[in-house]
Amino acid sequence: MTLDHASEAFTDADPDDVSSNPSGNRPFRDVLAARVSRRDIVRGGTVVAAVGFFGAGVAGALPATAGTSAPASVHPRRKPLLGFTPVDVSTADTVVVPDGYYAEVIIPWGTPIRPGGPAWRKDATNTAAEQAEQVGMHHDANCYFPIGRDGNRRGLLVTNHEYTDNVLLFADGNAVMTQEKVDKAVTAHGVSIVEIALDRQGHWQVVDSRYARRVTAATPVKFSGPVAADHPALQSNNEPMGTVNNCSYGETPWGTYLACEENFNGYFGTASPFTPSTAQARYGIAANNGSGANRWHQGDARWDIVANPNEANRFGWVVEIDPFKPHEKPVKRTALGRLKHEGATVWESRGRVVVYTGDDQDGDYVYKYVSKAPWRLLRLLGRSPLDHGTLYVAKFNDDGSGTWLPLVHGTGPLTTANGWADQADVLIRTRQAADAVGATPLDRPEWITVHPETDDVYMSLTNSTIAPAGGPNPRHPNPYGHIIRWHYRDGDTTRLDFEWDIFLLAGDPTKDPAVTVPDAQRFGSPDGLWFDPDGRLWIQTDISNSTINLGAYDRIGNNQMLVADPSTGEVRRFLVGPNGCEVTGIDLTPDRRTMFVNIQHPGEASTAIGAPTPANPRAVSNWPDFDPEGRPRAATVVVRKLDGGIIGT
């Protein structure tokens, strides 16, 4: 996820949506075009047969090409999974859920992480010290960790906070940046850990807890793996601390949480003369903050890229947090590479852990990490499975096959003779290493999820501005995005070969005949993806506020959450969010009767509606408080069925 995604015409794209990849590697759009062409389903430059892949035998599956085969159909045939009546497109400033369901708000930005903590001030005058004891801003991923025997009614809710909005965070908005304002923004970032419980009236509440804490951009951290804290590239003017721009997440089999650092470049800038190095430019480091108006360097030299140049190298990592050990430092697991991590989806195969992560920028790559040994054995030996393994990057081929290419020093072009000092150097400059080995650039790779029964992997590609080099392409440009999947023979996700295909093409079918969802369920810019234990694929959208309800998106409404049944190909809209928001983050209690969904950045500036100001922070949205003197607040929404049943049925 990024701060403000590209518009329909891609004329006002956020800098972090514009490709920084100079490699010249063949982009996925070209590979897709060639694959579509080989399958002979293009007529007159547009796709006339559905390209969605919901399993062999389902209408719309791509036919096999002579000499190749489509991914095997391994989705079990069963009773349809979707039992609710889909909701309509909405532009209302509220959360819409199906008949028979209700939604309640918990832990909005500013909620004390413990009862009795500093109260939220609706005029944005909370201090930095108070914010450090409150839930952070702009919720992204979340994960529910059950506690005790009745984990369906009590647990820890761990929530990422991707970024802050100066206009809403500060009483004086985007005025001059001071140390206190930087400190407040720093503490509004990171991760919130709160304990919640379901009361007898059926409402979830924050309860007092020894586990409650905030991990912020100022929290002391450790480095582990090939890039140690004493590495010269990590030496800075302050101790190692903090995590920023935490997007999606991962949950390990041993019960820890992986927070993922995405657009870290946007926190660094300078007023001094500055020309970024090749490595800095590859990550979007710039004098003007890259992704927007954080301007932290104006109040704190820690974030000045000239005064403190190595501080930026401490970000772009996956951060492991044990929610049940509040006194342990978070650990940055460097073997997973340094990039703009959308997430870190953890899967177990043959006893080993596999971690998938997309690098969320137009024209970047998807990665896979495989532990060298079974994770239980490594932990028995006192080693982290996330420190001992191999990182790979994907190459997609025209014929529907793919290969994972190792990012290992001394392998292929990653040699000392070619300027790669060691494995630490490969991981610090992961993007350049992936460029060198010939990875396939993608249309903004986002969330990744794995089918719980088939081990098939699904990935959302939100949208793209990259033009193909030539040949037929089902969509150019790609304002709506799509979802791909890949399959491993024998279900062995540690393998380095795979078969890929298109799951669906998003969009408005009245404007683009290639779209593979019915008009009533139209949507665009898929972002969050998550399989529940029953095999429902939940799809969350992140349409740019510069685009939403305009142009190609004028019939799609506010951002939303849908659910697909991969066995039948059916898609239904389940939830629509309020104005200016992104719908993101999802988890369930073990009994699947409570769902947690995040509503991020409600009320953010919208081309179609307006822009908030310090005098009128409610110009776009007043959700969820609807206080005439308040302001919009990101929050987690609890969704339950009125009859107490399983969500989605």
Image: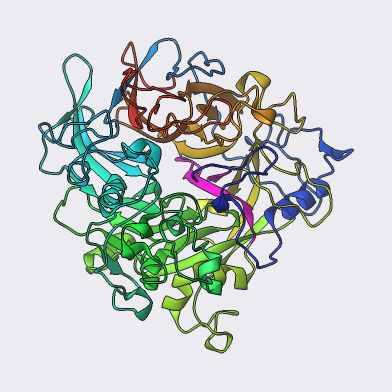
What residue is rendered at 22% in x and 61% in y? 220
State the image coordinates of residue 341 (x, y, percent, origin top left).
Answer: 45, 55
Using the image as rendered, state which of residue 476 and residue 587 is in the foreground.
Answer: 476
Q: Which residue is rendered at x = 57% and y = 23% of the image?
A: 557
Residues rendered magenta in the picture: 440-461
On the image, the x and y values in percent for residue 27 come to: 69, 57
The picture places residue 29, in percent across and down from the top left corner, at 71, 51
From the viewer's perspective, is 195 left or right of 647?
left
Report whether 642 appears left or right of 474: left
Seen at 45% across and 19% down, the residue is 93
Q: Which of 445 and 532 is in front in this view?
A: 445
Instruction: Report the coloring of the rendering.
Output: rainbow
Against 602, residue 203 (above or below) is above
Seen as rendered, the residue at the extreme bottom is 417
Residue 401 falls inside the magenta stretch: no
Who is closer to the viewer here, 648 or 464?
A: 464
